[in-house]
Amino acid sequence: MPFERLSKKGLPFPVVDDPVATQELAELVDVSDAYIMEQWATDIVLTGGLTYAYKGGTVFTGGAYSQVADGTVTLAASDVNYVERDATGVVTVNQTAFTDTKLPMAKVTTDVTGITDIEDWRVLETPAAATVGSHVVATTVALGPSHSVSALSSGMVLRATGATTSAYGYLVASDIPGLNASKITTGTLVVARGGTGVSAPTAGKILLGAGASAMTQLDFGAAGGYVRSTGAAWARSGLLAADLTGTVASARLSGVYSNITGLGTQAQALDMGTQNITNVGTYSGGAITTTGNITIDRSTHAYFNIDCGSSSNHAFIAFKEAGVVKWELYKELDAGSATPDFVLYNYGAAGFSVRVDYSTNAWDFQSNAVSMGALTSSGIAIESGSPVITLKDTNNVLSNVAYSS
């Protein structure tokens, strides 16, 4: 079938009846027509030797469209040449590869004298993004799928600065809304952020600060122990008597106390004022001075024991009046005797009044008169002097009985 088609000049090709020639001519016309009037296409007419000619095209730069004229580039012989253009329409060629920041046009292979193959590498192009300033995002309808920004730093975010404006900047703390703690379900808050650094501490244990490290858990220790300050840290310890200081006894020992044992040595005088001391045990210590009475009250076998030791000569019970000793009741060792006598000593008469001999139980009233009620005795001995027995009745002398040996 005859082949007839318009050429690039608008003129019809001649009719060719030969089938083979018709097919070759159709392929030639198809190739030629594919590039005619297309942007950035190969200009078949002007391409030859080591010169690659291309058709110009339209670009969008600086917020406006512009037309780039046709042009040519010189190819390298016996190599693969990569023809490409930038966003402004400047066409260049290199023998390495297409550049990431440019748009490919054609891949042209050459030998020593000329072109052996041309591959069309043009891609669908969308309008370029409008030029924008630093930290500003264009919002025009013509904005392309990407845009350029500058002067950014790692960690910045895109933030609305107004109803119709936005900018890149660092996250602002006041922009972060309050978050309920129940939303935080994982992780452990570190000490540097006000946390403990400890997840699920053991119930009942005390958390102790450890500087920048996670807090430590103080073990319970033995029953009855305490948490005690060492002056530099808190540690487990038993109660130390030396720690019970810092205030007077009246402030520390107020109220009623029972079962107090092991008080140790009482260095100061114990002043009970007008109060009483009730003691059901044994008291040992220094002198006891009281303005009240000492009462020994027991249903059976009530004792008031005075133990002065085997080497002491006297054990006194002194009776005073206005601080002056009037009488003493004490035990006394006779010279050269190992048995003590019991003596009631009268300080006013400067001598003893009654002595009870330890060995014989004999009573010695010395030269003192004895006045008593009825006397019943198996015998009365008057051993020395010029004794006189005077019989009285209601202080009236009845008679005197003289005796002489």
Image (spheres, helix red, strand yellow):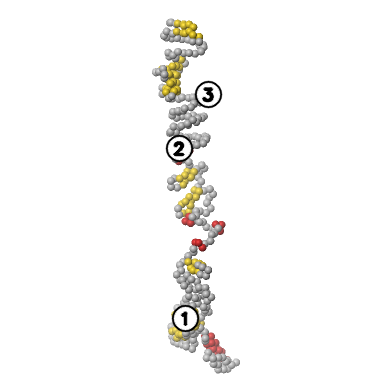
Of helix, strand and loop, which one carries label 1?
A: loop
- Which badge, 1 or 2, comes first in the chain's sequence? 1
Residue drawn at (51%, 42%) of the image: 224
The tag on residue 248 is: 2
Identify which residue, 24 or 94, lies in the foreground.
94
Quadrant for the N terminus in the image: bottom right
Residue drawn at (46%, 36%) of the image: 249
Identify which residue, 49 or 239, lies in the foreground.
239
- Which badge, 3 or 1, comes first in the chain's sequence? 1
The tag on residue 301 is: 3
Amino acid type for the residue under numbered disc 2? Val
Q: Are marks 3 and 1 in contact (CB under 8 Å)?
A: no
In the figure, 329 relative to 250: above or below?
A: above
Spatial CA distance of label 1 from label 2 is: 99 Å
The tag on residue 158 is: none
Of helix, strand and loop, which one carries label 3?
A: loop
Q: Of all residues shown, which one is farthest toward the right?
A: 1
In the figure, 3 relative to 175: above or below?
A: below
Q: Nearer the viewer, mark 3 or mark 1?
A: 1
Amino acid type for the residue under numbered disc 3? His
Residue 50 x %, y %: 44, 86
Residue position marked by numbered label 1 in the rendering: 89
